[in-house]
Amino acid sequence: MTGGIDEVAAAGLRNIAGMSPKVLAPGQVAVLVVEDDETIGRHLEIGLAGHGYAVSWVRTGGSALQMARTTAPSVALLDLGLPDVDGVEVARILRAEYPELLLIILTARSNEIDIIVGLDAGADDYLVKPFTLTVLLARLRAHLRRRSTSTSPATGPIVLGDLVLDVAARRCLLGGVEIALRPKEFELLVVLASRAGFAVSREQLMDQVWDENWFGSTKTLDVTMAALRKRLTQAADHPSSSQTPTITTLRRHGYRLEHPTGRGT
Ligand code: CA
């Protein structure tokens, strides 16, 4: 690391003074956005936060290095044309310090050399400006999904009272009895269960369970939710289950899976 970068990082520390790290909800992904363009930065901050990501937005390379040290993000979206230091240099440092970081370069320089340089600097992917939020979200999901299946095959089951969700085996058990769920019902339950006690918006559910190819109608969510509830209710009648999580509807927002409470066994 050069002295120049250290100075830049020190200046960055002054820039982010007073910004507190976001507190993550279970399953929430921390994203560091490094973008000096106010319009794009604001768009990314609002758009990503609206899809459940915990966003920290900084405008300089120096701030980016400091913020990365403070928040340990899982994802960094890095503009190459920054006011204080070349984004490629920031990418190299982030990659060296955080080997697990998902690093996506945002660039207006569409010529191939810059793209190759960006990837040489350790980036996992790049997006050429202008890009849409939909495209960015799709790429993020694809990368994060790949990572979660490739790096953590031994992820333990989600246990909520009598409900056990074995994500790796795609099995759902209630009181030790297996419930046969359709694929979308299972995925819906996994998303809700991984954020038990927290509200999950309809948009987040559509996004995570039905992927990016949905527009307008979310009737399919209602139908799948009704089917899932029915199966859980039927299974909860089994004598061996006493602590069954329930799904609360949040009007004009979405759903929340409640932590199970006993029914007085
Ligand atoms: Ca820029």
Image (cartoon, rainbow, N blue to C red):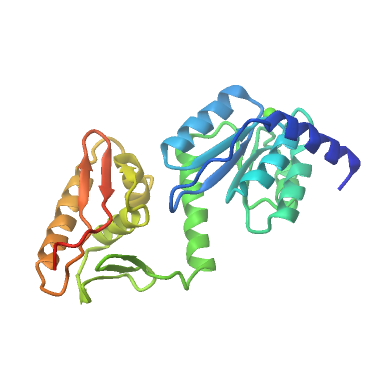
| Residue 185 in the image, given as x and y percentages of width and height | 24, 58
Residue at the extreme top of the image, as rendered: 39
Identify which residue, 10 or 130, lies in the foreground.
10
Tell me where residue 158 sits by quadrant. Answer: bottom left
When the figure is inspected, residue 76 is found, relative to residue 243, above or below; the finding is above
Which residue sits at x=19%, y=70%?
Answer: 179
Identify which residue, 111 or 196, lies in the foreground.
196
Would you say 228 lies left or right of 99 here?
Answer: left
Figure quadrant, ligand 1: top right
Count of numbered labels shown in the rendering: 0
Which residue sits at x=32%, y=43%?
Answer: 199
Residue 52 seen from this side: yes
Identify which residue, 234 or 197, lies in the foreground.
197
| Residue 173 in the image, given as x and y percentages of width and height | 24, 71
Tell me where residue 3 sits by quadrant. Answer: top right
Which residue sits at x=48%, y=66%?
Answer: 149
Residue 85 seen from this side: no
Which residue sits at x=20%, y=43%?
Answer: 249
| Residue 64 in the image, given as x and y percentages of width and height | 69, 39
Quadrant position of the C terminus in the picture? bottom left
Would you say 206 lies left or right of 262 here?
Answer: right
Would you say 17 lies left or right of 246 here?
Answer: right
| Residue 15 in the image, given as x and y percentages of width and height | 71, 29
Identify which residue, 50 or 149, lies in the foreground.
50
Tell me where residue 13 sits by quadrant. Answer: top right
Residue at the extreme right of the image, as rendered: 3
